[in-house]
Image (cartoon, rainbow, N blue to C red):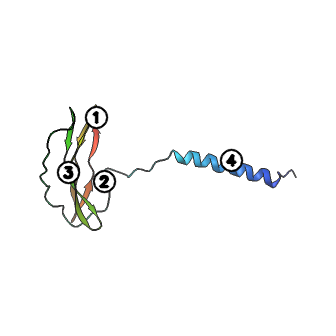
Amino acid sequence: MNVLPLSRRRGAGAVAAAAAALLLAGCAVYPAGPYYGDVVAVAPPPVRIEAVGVAPFPGAIWINGYWGWRGGGHYWVPGRWDRPRPGYHWSPHRWDRRGPGWRERPGRWDRD
């Protein structure tokens, strides 16, 4: 029987482990669907009115603030200025009714 020496077998395992690590390094995990988080029983408060002010650069667009959910309660995320993205439009953050509760859908850039 032709058996490789132990030192050569270990080297092959190291090469296989390095190859697997490289393959997995390019992997990304994305949530299934546009929603995240659990359905919560507490409706979001009314949207706050924010002072928008003057755009910091030409062509800037204002993205409204929204209510997020963390640690059993809603918290306000302030609005911000952003650069437009050609071929995309902004779909704002929102809360959708799901049975007796609410589900958060984050704002995002959607293709036109």
Residue type (three-letter) at the residue carrying disc 4: Val
Residue type (three-letter) at the residue carrying disc 1: Arg
Q: Which residue is mark 3?
A: 65
Give the Cα distance between marks 3 and 1. Answer: 19 Å
Image x and y of residue 2, in percent: 86, 50
Horizontal side of residue 30 vs 38, given as left or right: right
Label whose residue precedes the other's in the sequence (4 or 3):
4
Label whose residue precedes the other's in the sequence (4 or 1):
4
Determine which of the numbered discs, if any, sits on residue 10 in the image: none
Give the Cα distance between marks 4 and 2. Answer: 40 Å
Q: Residue at x 40, y 50 (%)?
A: 30
Give the Cα distance between marks 4 and 3. Answer: 49 Å
Disc 2 is placed on an element classified as loop
Q: Which residue is mark 1?
A: 85
Give the Cα distance between marks 2 and 1. Answer: 22 Å
Q: Are marks 4 and 3 in contact (CB under 8 Å)?
A: no
Give the Cα distance between marks 3 and 2. Answer: 18 Å
